[in-house]
Amino acid sequence: MSYFSESDIKQIENHELTLDIVNRQLRDFETGFPYSDIESAATINHGIRPMLDNNWVEHYTRNQDKYNIVKFVPASGAATRMFKDLFEYMTTGEMNKTTQLVLENLEQFAFYDDLRATLPENPSNMDIIKHLVTDAGINYGNLPKALLQFHKYDGFNRTALAEHLIEGAQYAKSNDMVNIHFTVSPEHIDGFNTHLVEIIPQYESALSVKYNITMSTQQPSTDTIAVNLDNTPFRTDDGKLLFRPAGHGALIANLNNIDADIIFIKNIDNVCPESARADTIYHKRALAGLAMQIQTQIFDYMRALDNDTADTNEIRNFIDTTLGIKTTANTNVRDILNRPLRVCGIIKNTGEPGGGPFWVRDKNGLLGLQIVEPAQIAPDNIDILKRGEFFSPTDIVCMPRDYMGNRFNLLNFIDERAGFISEKSSGGRPLRAMERPGLWNGAMANWNTVFVETPLTTFTPVKVISDLIKPSHKN
């Protein structure tokens, strides 16, 4: 195993890691991660429920005030990748498609007025782009997506953060309280707080709710060491070890600290303007109604098992048909039932890169439903990936309590084998980086999972700046 100096060990400890953990990470770089044992893609009525009817919405509406509800929004990091093409134009001076589209449609963007106020007279194209993405102007290339003006309304604009507050009041409310938790990078916390102070009073008044906004940062202990291409520890120019954030799967630690009965998860950039939000609200509520009903049934079975009144055949049928886990004679039904539950809204795949829902065998040979990313699929199984008709979850409703009312320790339900390794660079030098099991896939691999089809209108991510002028983002 690699030798670490006393100063290395001190750096490891300051990162809230241990030498054993780092050495284990180095072994994982050497051995790699096993591919998922996928059998087939999940399809409608074969692992995926069709779109839900209004009965589930009504069930949620009748019961939501009985639950402590939190909306959990991953919102860490700057929007640098969103402006990648614009930075490229600034560096090379060569016009590209995205930059041209932005310049030609500038007045359509919600941030146009703010940008215009910073521009010199008769600005060149380069002036406009510099004032858009750098601190010469509105500095959008270095702000988090949450604080960018996303949508234009008559007489005002809204940031992505503001849209999530409005949306939260429309489905994540319990007894007129809206609890929203954002994961935030430390350098952006002040910006979040300043904006929240500006908008919360008017939204509380207009919507007759109270907001409880909390934030957390990604824990340093979830970072992973970087290595050279020969798997030896990568060192920066000053000789120090390099630790990197290990992907959004690290946020399972943040999720684990949320005290709630129901947790809605939705990414910061997957938000639409009010005129296009009806489908989102309907299906969020329907997914939660289904989650409530399934959890109630699980709890009834757990109590029956405690009282020796359970019909084991009925429970096995429920696990097979509702939870999508194909039990065997040796399956302990109590162990299967006594796990956190998630109901995932998934959409038809229209060509977006990413994983999707599949039937997968776990390390014990048990066949069940999982989200699998392309990096987890062996080359000889790539045809199964291509046959998948659905995309990774766009919405997740989590039920993180057991039948006794206690919070599950979500860290106990991670499949640590579901990470993957990618090639990156630092200071112009290549390196290998380790991604922890993703939040949707490996970090929740041992949850009970239910997939439900939702319409494409519930998925409006903003991956590049030009997405903001698509019809789905126009009010």
Image (cartoon, grey):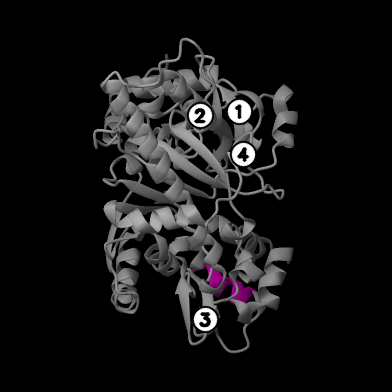
Given this view, does label 4 or label 2 mark the residue nearer the observer? 4
Quadrant of residue 46 in the image?
Answer: top right
For badge 3, the amino acid type reads Tyr
**Foreground: 1 or 354?**
354
Residue located beneath label 1 in the image? 359
Q: Secondary structure at mark 1?
A: strand
Q: Going by the image, does 146 lie left or right of 42?
A: left
**Foreground: 257 or 170?**
170
Quadrant of residue 180 in the image?
Answer: bottom left
If you read the primary sequence from the N terminus, does the residue marked by circle 2 or circle 3 appear first? 3
Looking at the image, do the residues carrying marks 2 and 3 touch, with CB atoms under 8 Å apart? Answer: no
- Residue at image point 31% right, 72% down: 200
Q: Going by the image, does 375 lie left or right of 287?
A: right
Q: Gap in Å between the C-alphas at discs 3 and 1?
A: 44 Å
Residue located beneath label 3 in the image? 153
Bounds of the magenta span? Answer: 126-134
- Residue at image point 34% right, 71% down: 195
